[in-house]
């Protein structure tokens, strides 16, 4: 085991912050348009407001350019081998769910060959307040935190701080000599684990680890630890759900990825991600603790209700006191633009705008299947699991219309992102709904994005692609 990093982490170049402007949906009334434009945009329109609004009502929503688009690499769909006409089906898909009051609002982004061909905000960010959704709204991305934290640990892997099959007990001594819980004759018994829990196991959700639940026996609430380190220490005596590597179980494994980042780097996860990933990639709107100055750009969270599953408010945008509990499972908030920058880096083979975080070989290792033949049950048949990502193994069974080797993950409150290296395309969908089992919009998003491709890229070798398992 190497000592934690002590030297200051290198400062890397980054472009300036994303400017703020509102992206207004065209079906809003005149008053809503006026109220949601920012002061900068409004000042530019002084003397021509009526003309501008009239023009806006005559063009597609994705054509209304704001400052967010001005800072992203934009292209027409035809310039990247896609159809403008067919991309309108993305807009129609989102609009149907919004009109049926199944969603309050969405931000959808599709990029190909490194250029954003579709970026659209529709509906409301806060329906009760009458606030229109804009392209720069922040969303709680829940489990879409996991790929970012995984990249953080893989950067340390590239620096030679560990091997994938090193036991996590090298940094967490309380996790040596683990036991496994199983049932014999209706009784819970334990036995010694067949092998140590390794870094690979926690990266691939094959560890069997858990974090002690917030409720104890009799349903009594436990006080949540103030830091992830405290939670990990408190869970050291919990038996494993299975022998490490034998099964795939979605859950707490990425919290152990997060604590390894902290132990190896000697930094808090929040500081590490900000210094090593967010600042270098200009992901300036991605936070564990959203600053009070950005609360007006936070999207409200909704939940389905009643027999028709129409939305009702679950959580209104409000300032929340900063936390020191930086989970690897969830916790980050971000924008479509920031998450595009992160995944364009992945699609590029670890580099964006001259800043390299990982090598193409490491990303190919990450998007290879490390789960064996175990069912990745949260996605269903046709998927494997790599290091931080689900992998499309069999498009004939997978519910996402993507090429073999595509990698993806989503969040419990509706967000989803996927990358298709074979077609050099990525998609990001942001929405806020606490349960989406009654919706197929996430899977349908990959379908309506992929059907807009009119010039295939499959004859060109992708920059990154998972390795096939030898038989």
Image (cartoon, rainbow, N blue to C red):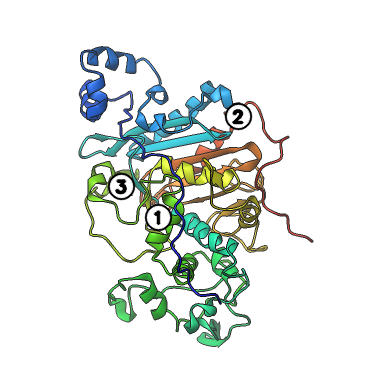
Q: Give the SS element for disc 3.
A: strand
Does any portion of residue 103 appear in the rendered image? yes
Q: Residue 453 carries which label?
A: 2
Q: Residue 274 carries which label?
A: 1
Q: Is residue 179 above or below residue 151?
A: below
Question: Of marks 2 and 3, which one's residue comes earlier in the chain?
Answer: 3
Q: Residue at x 67, y 33 (%)?
A: 457
Density class for disc 2 (Cα within 10 Å; few <14, some 14-19, many ≥20) is many
The CA span between labels 3 and 1 is 29 Å
Does any portion of residue 441 appear in the rendered image? no
The image position of residue 249, as x and y in percent, is 54, 67
Density class for disc 1 (Cα within 10 Å; few <14, some 14-19, many ≥20) is some
Which circle, 1 or 2, is nearer the viewer? 1
Question: Of marks 1 and 2, which one's residue comes earlier in the chain?
Answer: 1
Q: Which residue is drawn at 61% across and 37% down?
A: 424
The image position of residue 198, as x and y in percent, is 58, 73
Q: Which residue is drawn at 59% across and 79% down?
A: 196
Pointer 2 and pointer 3: residues touching (CB < 8 Å)? no
Pointer 3 and pointer 1: residues touching (CB < 8 Å)? no
Question: Of marks 3 and 1, which one's residue comes earlier in the chain?
Answer: 1
For the image, the number of numbered tags is: 3
Q: Give the SS element for disc 2.
A: loop
The N terminus: image quadrant: bottom right
* Residue at image mark 3: 302
Q: For this view, does 71 lie left or right of residue 296? A: right
Relative to the observer, which residue lies in front, 73 or 427?
A: 73
The CA span between labels 2 and 3 is 33 Å
Q: For this view, does 298 lie left or right of residue 80? A: left
């Amino acid at each position: 085991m190497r000592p934690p990093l002590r030297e200051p982490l290198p400062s890397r170049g980054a472009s300036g912050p994303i400017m703020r402007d509102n992206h207004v949906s065209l079906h809003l009334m005149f008053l809503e348009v006026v109220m949601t434009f920012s002061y900068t945009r409004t000042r530019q329109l002084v003397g021509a407001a009526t003309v501008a609004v009239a023009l806006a009502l005559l063009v597609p929503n994705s054509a209304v350019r704001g400052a967010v688009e001005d800072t992203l690499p934009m292209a027409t769909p035809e310039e990247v081998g896609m159809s403008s006409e067919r991309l309108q089906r993305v807009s129609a898909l989102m609009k149907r769910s919004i009109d049926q009051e199944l969603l309050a609002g969405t931000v959808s982004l599709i990029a190909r060959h490194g250029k954003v061909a579709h970026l659209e905000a529709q509906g409301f960010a806060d329906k009760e307040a009458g606030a229109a959704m804009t392209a720069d709204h922040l969303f709680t991305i829940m489990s879409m935190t996991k790929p970012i934290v995984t990249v953080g640990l893989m950067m340390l892997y590239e620096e030679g701080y560990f091997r994938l099959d090193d036991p996590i007990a090298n940094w967490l001594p309380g996790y040596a000599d683990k036991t496994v819980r199983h049932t014999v004759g209706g009784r819970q018994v334990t036995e010694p684990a067949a092998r140590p829990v390794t870094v690979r196991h926690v990266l691939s959700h094959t560890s069997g680890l858990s974090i002690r639940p917030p409720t104890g026996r009799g349903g009594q609430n436990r006080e949540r630890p103030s830091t992830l380190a405290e939670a990990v220490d408190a869970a050291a005596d919990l038996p494993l759900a299975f022998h490490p590597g034998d099964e795939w179980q979605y859950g707490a494994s990425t919290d152990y990825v997060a604590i390894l980042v902290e132990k190896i780097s000697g930094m808090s996860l929040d500081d590490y991600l900000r210094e090593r990933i967010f600042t270098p990639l200009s992901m300036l709107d991605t936070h564990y603790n959203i600053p009070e100055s950005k609360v007006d750009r936070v999207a409200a969270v909704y939940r389905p209700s009643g027999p028709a599953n129409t939305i009702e408010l679950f959580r209104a945008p409000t300032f929340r006191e900063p936390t020191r509990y930086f989970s690897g499972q969830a916790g980050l908030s971000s924008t479509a633009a920031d998450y595009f920058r992160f995944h364009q880096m992945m699609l590029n083979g670890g580099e964006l705008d001259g800043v390299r975080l990982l090598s193409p070989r490491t990303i190919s290792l990450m998007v290879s299947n490390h789960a064996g033949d175990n069912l990745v049950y949260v996605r269903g048949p046709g998927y494997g699991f790599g290091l931080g990502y689900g992998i499309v193994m069999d498009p004939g069974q997978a519910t996402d219309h993507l090429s073999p080797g595509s990698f993806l993950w989503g969040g419990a409150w509706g967000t989803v992102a996927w990358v298709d290296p074979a077609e050099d395309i990525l998609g990001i969908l942001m929405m806020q709904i606490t349960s989406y089992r009654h919706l197929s919009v996430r899977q349908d998003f990959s379908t309506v994005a992929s059907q807009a491709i009119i010039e295939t890229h499959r004859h060109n070798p992708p920059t990154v692609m998972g390795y096939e398992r030898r038989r």
